Image: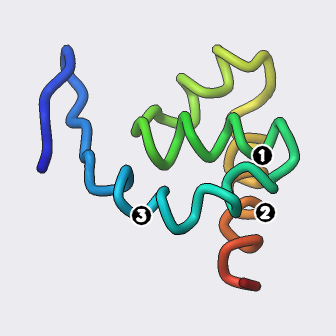
Amino acid sequence: MATFTGNRVQDESWLHAAEDGSSAILALPDFERFVYVLSVLEGFTNQECATLLGVSPQQIEETRLRALQHFWKR
């Protein structure tokens, strides 16, 4: 089920997936976990994540890909 918060759509289906994959999310290194949650689960853009975390948008993209690779390896 999707809900609207401000101008963002929040897809709550990840909550059910997180019950099974929460250990995988928690196993990510801190920075990768922050980037994954902000960009994938919360839907922030690379620029928004970069501003919040004080890094470049390119670093956000690279970090998100590393985080996703952790899940693909499982």
Residue ID at (78%, 46%): 32
Question: Label 3: which residue?
Answer: 17
The alpha-carbon separation of the residues under discs 3 and 2 comes to: 20 Å
Q: Position of residue 22 (x, y in %)?
A: 60, 56
> In the image shown, does 49 or 37 lie closer to the viewer?
37
Question: Label 2: which residue?
Answer: 66
Residue ID at (65%, 15%): 52
Q: Amino acid at mark 3?
A: Ala
Q: Position of residue 63 (x, y in %)?
A: 77, 50
Tag 3 near tag 1, CB within 8 Å: no
Tag 1 near tag 2, CB within 8 Å: yes
Q: Amino acid at mark 2?
A: Arg
Indicate whether 63 appears above or below 73: above
11 vs 30, left or right, is left
Question: Label 1: which residue?
Answer: 32
The alpha-carbon separation of the residues under discs 3 and 1 comes to: 18 Å
| Most distant residue in the right direction | 29
56 vs 15, left or right, is right
Residue ID at (72%, 43%): 33
Residue ID at (68%, 50%): 61
Q: Secondary structure at mark 3?
A: helix
Sooner in the amino-acid sequence: mark 1 or mark 2: 1
